[in-house]
Amino acid sequence: MNNNIYINGRFLTQKITGVQRYSFELIKVLSNNDKIDIIVLVPKNSILKENYDFDFSIKKIGYNIGHAWEQFDLPLYLYKKNNPLFISFTNTSPIFYRNKISTIHDLSVYENNDWFSFQFRILYKILLPLIIYTSKNILTVSQFSKNEIIKKFKIDNEKIHVAYNGISFSRKKVEQFKKVKSKANYILYVGSISERKNLNSLLEAFNRLHNTELLLKIVGCSFIHIKSKKIKYNKNVEFLKNVSNDELVELYSNAKLLVFPSFYEGFGIPPLEAMFCECPVIASNIPVIKELYGDSVLYINPFNIDSIKDKIELLLIDDKLRRKIIEKSLKKIKKFSWIKSGAKVLDVIKNNT
């Protein structure tokens, strides 16, 4: 196969969220394969985020930034390189270039109009079909998302492949934090303020708890974000907008539990991270969570605030249930790794070169 594989590196100019993490980790795996040469393309006039620690090579090209760079500068550069295979691990890809493998993480933009701005919905509802129909293959992050994409766009089952998210944490770090007996008394939420994440329901459920000493730590958004959404909160809610990887591991490791109340997900990384850190998980009873995590989490109805409240209280007082969930979690996480997902991506690459 052709050794040169070009990859969309625009994500390196963006804040790390689930999509960017997926891109970053898979590129790291592929760059360690001595049978292919990875060339990561980034906008020449953009500033790379400092919190990406990478050792793969990048090449700065073009004159535009953002979507304009992706849709115009990228394909022009690739055409000059005699149409090599191009991969995008984010939700976008150049629609005017066909020798490509694209990744679609989910179809949340089609699920509920209230979750996104009008401009965002229009842009992605134009781009997604064109990306899917002009790609040689599609990657996605769960069987749930694969089924959704096939149903929505009527594409062949053989065209789309599932490569799960993996775990980016160090087992040594988890053991280090677990050794220190913490007296911390908090539950955890990790995610954005997006409507589909259903943070409002969690905050309302937290307000109904009888335990007035318990804290709720919210990682990923600030007090200003909450205030702008007119979401109810109380003095026992702490906001942690930016935390390092090590700080996040510590938060998971010392938390009583993680609550993941989303209405819709293509994957759902925080439960996987929590499980790795031996933090029991309460999660929505949505299809993708059941696919990924089975009986290793405690399920809630995300539309029912009392369901969230009751399961939090149950898991706080039932030590036997906590131990059982943690035990099942540690078995479940063995099926998720960036190495395994990288091998699946490599198979797709081989079939296209």
Image (cartoon, helix red, strand yellow):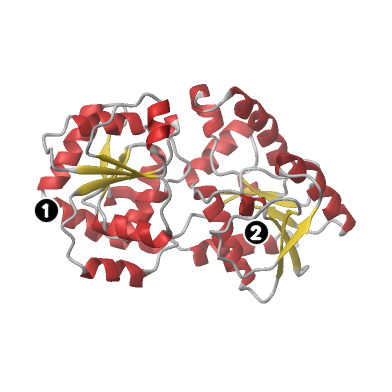
Q: Is residue 41 above or below residue 145?
A: below
Per the image, label 2 sits on a secondary structure element best described as: helix
Q: What kind of residue is marked 2?
A: Val
Q: Is residue 224 above or below residue 3?
A: above
Q: Using the image as rendered, state which of residue 15 and residue 126 is in the foreground.
A: 15
Q: Residues within 10 Å of mark 1 (few under 14, many from 20)?
A: few
Where is residue 266? Give x, y as percent.
Answer: 48, 42
Q: Using the image as rendered, state which of residue 311 and residue 344 is in the foreground.
A: 311
Q: Using the image as rendered, state which of residue 319 and residue 214 is in the foreground.
A: 214
Where is residue 132? Give x, y as percent.
Answer: 68, 40
Name the residue: 17% across, 65% down: 181
Q: Is residue 19 above or below residue 127?
A: below
Q: What kind of residue is marked 1?
A: Asp
Per the image, label 1 sits on a secondary structure element best described as: helix
Picture quadrant where residue 56 is located: bottom right
Residue occupied by mark 1: 319
The answer to the question of whether label 2 and label 1 lie on touching residues, with beta carbons closer than 8 A, is no
Residue occupied by mark 2: 348
Would you say 155 lies left or right of 112 here? right
Picture quadrant where residue 67 is located: top right
Would you say 236 lies left or right of 190 here? left
- Residue 263 visible in the shown view: no
Q: CA distance from mark 2 to mark 1?
A: 45 Å
The circle on residue 2 is: none
Name the residue: 69% across, 64% down: 350
Picture quadrant where residue 92 is located: top right
In the picture, the quarter occupied by the C terminus is bottom right
Q: Residue furthest bottom?
A: 34
Name the residue: 30% across, 62% down: 331
Mark 2 or 1, closer to the camera: 1
Where is residue 282? Give x, y as percent.
Answer: 27, 44
